[in-house]
Image (cartoon, rainbow, N blue to C red):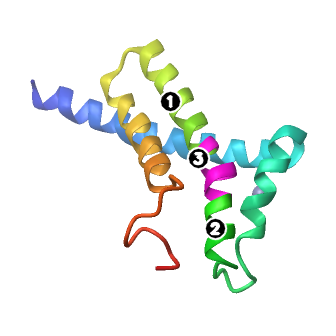
Amino acid sequence: MPLQTVIWQGLWGLAAVFLAEMVRDAYHVVSHYWPPLMKLHNWHHRVYKKDFTPVSEELYRQAQLYNDVPESLVMMGLMATLALGVGLPGLWLGVLYSGGFCWRRSPAPRAGCSPLT
Ligand SMILES: [Zn+2]
C-alpha cells in the first residue's frame, strides 16, 4: 500500500475519532431533552460527587449500564453507518474507538478498569 494512501486513511481515522466524539456530545445534549434518554442519562449525573469522585461502586455500574453502554452503541452504529456508506477504510477507526468505549464501559467489572479499584 502506498505511503500516501496510509497517510490519507490515517487522517480519515483521526477525523472519525473526532466525529465519534461529536456524536457522543450530541447524544449527551439529546439526553437532556428527550424523555426516554433522560431517564437513562440521570444515572450518569448521579454518579459523581462535586469533587468528581464516584458516589459508590454500585451507582457507577448502574450509570455504565444505563447511560454509557447505550451511548457507546449509538456511537458505534453511526460511525459504522458512515464508514459503510462512504467506503473509506480509515473511518473504521471511529467504530473501533467507539467500541473501545463500549468495552471499557461494560458492566462486567475488570481489575484495573474501574476508578474505584
Ligand atoms: Zn448530562
Instruction: Give the amino acid type for the residue marked by disc 3 in the picture.
Output: Val
Ligand 1 is within 8 Å of the C-beta of the residue at disc 2: no
Q: Local crowd at mark 3 within 10 Å, few (<14), some, or many (≥20)? A: many
Q: Predominant secondary structure in magenta? A: helix
Tell whether circle 1 marks a residue whose Cβ is less than 8 angstroms from ligand 1: no
Q: Which residues are magenta?
A: 63-70
Reading the image, the residue beneath label 3 is 69
Q: Is residue 40 above or below residue 46?
A: above
Judged left or right of residue 3, residue 78 is right
Q: Residue at x 43, y 22 (%)?
A: 83
Residue 98, placed above or below residue 104: above
Q: Is residue 22 magenta?
A: no
Q: Nearer the viewer, mark 1 or mark 3?
A: 3
Q: Is residue 71 above or below residue 112?
A: above
Q: Which residue is mark 2?
A: 60
Q: Amino acid at mark 1?
A: Met
Q: CA distance from mark 2 to mark 1?
A: 26 Å
Q: Quadrant of the N terminus?
A: top left
Q: Are marks 1 and 3 in contact (CB under 8 Å)?
A: no
Question: Label 1 vs label 3: CA separation?
Answer: 15 Å
Which residue shows up at 47% across the image and 25% down it? 80
What is the distance, in whole Å, between disc 3 and disc 2 at their CAs? 12 Å
Q: Which residue is mark 1?
A: 79
The mark that comes first in sequence, 2 or 1, is: 2
Q: Nearer the viewer, residue 77 or 114?
A: 114
Quadrant of res 45: bottom right
Q: Decide which of 78, 36 is in the foreground and name it.
A: 36
Secondary structure beneath disc 2? Answer: helix
**Which label's residue is closer to the chain start, 3 or 2?**
2
